[in-house]
Amino acid sequence: MCDAWVYLMTSRPFGPLYVGVTNDIARRALEHREGRGSSFTTRYRLTRLVYLERHDDIVVAIRREKAMKHWPRAWKLNLIEGLNPHWEDLFLSLNA
């Protein structure tokens, strides 16, 4: 068993969204913040981590990420709003 994370990045509330998966959320979020993440997050400067979902199995997390990438935008917005209605940057609480 290991931690696996599905996450959403953005630049601002209701801005462009990126769905990702990782086994090390602190490292991966930092990469996005420093412009070393995906080309999409770098191009659109998506540095704000606004949604996190922990899984015990990376295979399950990857399956969830792939499904979420095909969701309508409204579903992703509802997911964020349910967990993080103020669109706070969750990166700031990762090492707290």
Image: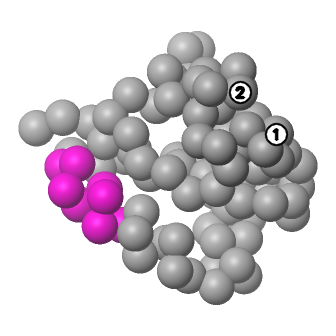
Number of marks present in the image shown: 2
Q: Residues within 10 Å of mark 2 (few under 14, many from 20)?
A: some
Task: Judge whether residue 30 is colored magenta.
Answer: no
Question: Which residue has dot 2 on it?
Answer: 35
Q: Which secondary structure, mark 1?
A: loop
Quarter of the view holding residue 94: top right
Task: Specify whether 48 is left or right of 96.
Answer: right
Q: Residue at x 56, y 82 (%)?
A: 71
Rendered-image quadrant of the N terminus: top left
Give the mark, 2 or 1, whose residue is nearer the N terminus. 2
Which x, y percent locates residue 12? 89, 49
Quarter of the view holding residue 95: top right
Q: Residue at x 70, y 78 (%)?
A: 73
Residue 45, disc: 1
Task: Specify whether 49 is left or right of 53.
Answer: right
Which x, y percent locates residue 5? 39, 44
Query: What range is drawn magenta here?
Result: 57-64
**41, 95: nearer the viewer:** 41
Majority secondary structure in the magenta region? helix
Q: Label 1 sits on what residue type?
A: Arg
Q: Which secondary structure, mark 2?
A: loop
Tell me, yes or no, whether the two marked residues, 2 and 1, touch with CB atoms within 8 Å.
yes
Rendered-image quadrant of the C terminus: top right
- Determine whether 58 is above or below 37 in the image: below
Colour scheme used in the picture?
Answer: one colour
Give the Cα distance between marks 2 and 1.
Answer: 7 Å
Q: Residues within 10 Å of mark 1 (few under 14, many from 20)?
A: some
Q: Residue at x 82, y 47 (%)?
A: 44
Q: Is residue 93 visible?
A: no
Q: Farthest residue in the left direction? A: 1
